[in-house]
Amino acid sequence: MTVDEKLIEIREFRGNGYQPLIDFNSWRVAILNFIDEIIPDQIKTFERHTETDEVFILLHGKAILFVGDGNITLENLYSVVMQPERIYNIKCNIWHSVVLSRDGSVLIVENQNTNKKNTEYSPLLPEHQQFVRKVAREEQPEDWGKLHTV
């Protein structure tokens, strides 16, 4: 029996990358699945949202959230190995990126109007890139795709 969408929306996304699934009033729920652009060797920039926090929840696989401080560009970098069923809220104006294992998937909740107009980007310095690769390597690198040695 199918339930009318006036009562309940049921959404899923099994493709690669980022896909918004539900928008309502001011919020959005999306899924981010593994994509080559978030292999540790491929991450060249971090982003921050100037008008919203952003929530990440690990659905399956492995994930590492990287966060950093800095006013104009990314300065200090930190990592958090995500655990399933925990909520990770990246605060407004905090630089961030995520690394997913090939079977990794995270649920994202953010403002519906989060876009390039209210998102800033900071290039990673070589020492930041080395930090991302080092942390990923320590968390079972075979899951992260191709990793170069530091």
Image (tube, rainbow, N blue to C red):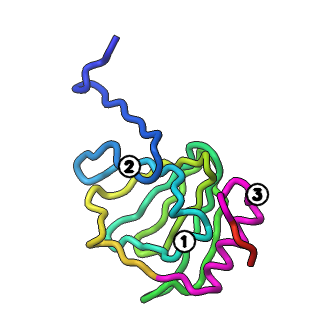
Task: Report the front residue among 134 and 148.
Answer: 148
Dot 2 alpha-carbon crowd within 10 angstroms: few under 14, some 14 to 19, many 20 or more: some
The front one of 125 and 9 is 125
Position of residue 124 in the picture relative to residue 80 (left or right): left
- Quarter of the image where the C terminus is located: bottom right
- Please give the range of residues in magenta: 123-146
**Position above or below: 8 against 87:** above
Which element is circle 1 on? loop
Q: Which residue does the image show at 54% across and 82% down from the upper left?
A: 124
Mark 3 to mark 1 CA distance (whole Å): 18 Å
Q: In the image, what residue type sits under mark 1?
A: Ile
- The residue wearing badge 3 is 140
- Residue assigned mark 1: 43
Of labels 2 and 3, earlier in sequence is 2
Residue assigned mark 2: 19
Using the numbered discs, state the Cα–Cα distance from disc 2 to disc 1 in whole angstroms. Answer: 19 Å
Tell me the SS state at disc 3. Answer: loop
Q: Residue at x 22, y 49 (%)?
A: 25
Quadrant housing residue 63: bottom right
Residue 32 spot, x, y in % from top left: 47, 51
